[in-house]
Image (tube, rainbow, N blue to C red):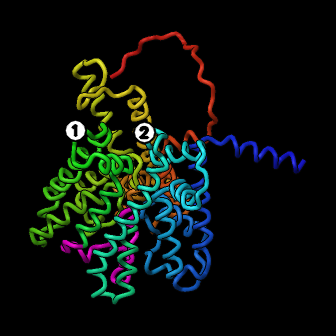
Amino acid sequence: MKQKIIREWFRRKRSLTQTQYIAYGFFVLIMTGTLLLMLPVSSRDGQSMDFLGAMFTATSASCVTGLVAADTWTQWSLFGQMVIITMIQIGGLGFITIGVFVSIVLRRRIGLKERGLMQESTSALQIGGIVRLTKKIILGTAFFEGIGALLLSIRFIPQYGFFRGIYYGIFHAVSAFCNAGFDLMGHQTPYNSLSAYYDDWLVNLVIMSLIIIGGIGFIVWDDISKKGIHMRKYLLQTKIVLLTTVILVFGGAAMFYWLERDLLMADMSLGGKILSSLFSSVTARTAGFNTIDTGALSDGSKLLTIILMFIGGSPGSTAGGVKTTTIVVLLLYVRSSIRRTYGVNVLGRRLEEEAIKQASSVFTINLFLALSVSLAIMAIQPMSMSDTLFETFSAIGTAGMTTGITRDLLPASKALIILLMYCGRIGSMSFALAFTQQKRITRVQNPAERINVG
């Protein structure tokens, strides 16, 4: 009987879909991190963290979110911080990417199954050249994080000493590139993130650059590295991602400046206002850092932040959200419907119908999950609607921004936020597909009947 159960387990393991491998892999990463963070050596006071608290932090780190129930510097020892930054790096790049790279280094054969998993993990458009792309991802990550750490160390070494300054530079560079939002500034004021550097051009520009580079997607990297600055030769996805990123960054910054210039930023210099506006626009799209008090934002700025968090970064990146391409596809589809044109066209190309269907599904599922969990949390404990919506959209978008209610959540509410962070990282649609097996598609269709819509 026991042998039969074991054989059945191995049979099911071999039949796992690519989506299930990724979903289960992230679950294993989260549980491993949870157990490590529960060790007494992980906590600064030598006391074991409770299971839910450790799991919340492990999920936030593995899913590169940044929501924390306990301040990272205050709660975790050096060992605990190393566990967190390791999970951030693995979660940001994807364990499949790291696994394939290790196989390349060890000169092991990369089979079709591994190549397919890598394609799914990075949202690559084709399986050809996936091994070369893996090398480029790892080497590019090391390069950008290394440069970022070096530049940040210029500011941190005079403040914290040589070794601690370098460590702070590395930690925050990795956290920024992976769009994680974890910081070690709690020694100044817990939960204050990078507020002490709101007018520091070096820290702001380095962190923002790392966030953007990590969030535009590995496919965009690959395309730019091949074709240089020849915009016309870029893939359609690259063009859409770059154009949308520019609009969201500078459009969002202009809106933040307009909404907060006479309120939260009233006492800042012009340079401080510009930096804070730009940083708020960039970090809202899944990064999780903040240089101004998020809880003190006006209602208009909170709504703008929620919108940016929901959109997130781009496909195949370290960022979360429904992705820039999803929003663009839906907007183009609406434009096409209004103009009554045949097909959805953009930049001299026509989008596939499958892209429109997938964009609609991702948008709807994420919105439904965020709103459903918001209602559930408000039913569990008394929370304001704006703060609750801010928290849930931050979790599903793996943005990591909060108005300050994370540490006040009850266990049931924390469990729901954990679920949202997990869904946001692997993809809400992928999470749903992970519970289904691949089925044969039947060509038989039901009779059609018209209904009124809109």
Question: What secondary structure predominates along the stretch shown in magenta?
Answer: loop
The residues tagged by marks 2 and 1 sit, at their Cα atoms, a distance apart of 19 Å
Residue at the limit of the structure toward the bottom, as seen here: 161
Q: Is residue 392 above or below residue 438?
A: below
Going by the numbered disc 2, the residue's amino acid type is Leu
Q: Amino acid at mark 1?
A: Arg
Question: How many badges with numbers are in the image?
Answer: 2
**Which residue is nearer to you in this view: 112 or 371?**
112
Residue 153 is situated, as x and y percent measured from the top left of the image, at 31, 79
Mark 2 residue element: loop
In the picture of the structure, the residue carrying the numbered disc 1 is 232
Q: Position of residue 190 (x, y in %)?
A: 37, 78
Residue 431 sits in which quadrant?
Answer: top right
Q: Which residue is mark 2?
A: 125
Q: Residue at x 20, y 60 (%)?
A: 278
Q: Which residues are magenta?
A: 175-202
Mark 2 Cα-neighbour bin, 10 Å: few <14, some 14–19, many ≥20: few
Q: Is residue 273 magenta?
A: no
Label 1: element kind: helix
- Assess whether residue 186 is covered by the magenta stretch: yes
The label on residue 1 is none
At a point 34% along the width and 54% down the height, the residue shown is 215
Q: Residue furthest right?
A: 1
Mark 1 is surrounded, within 10 Å at the Cα level, by few (under 14), some (14 to 19) or many (20 or more) other residues, namely few
Nearer to us of marks 2 and 1 is: 1
Q: Position of residue 121 (x, y in %)?
A: 50, 48
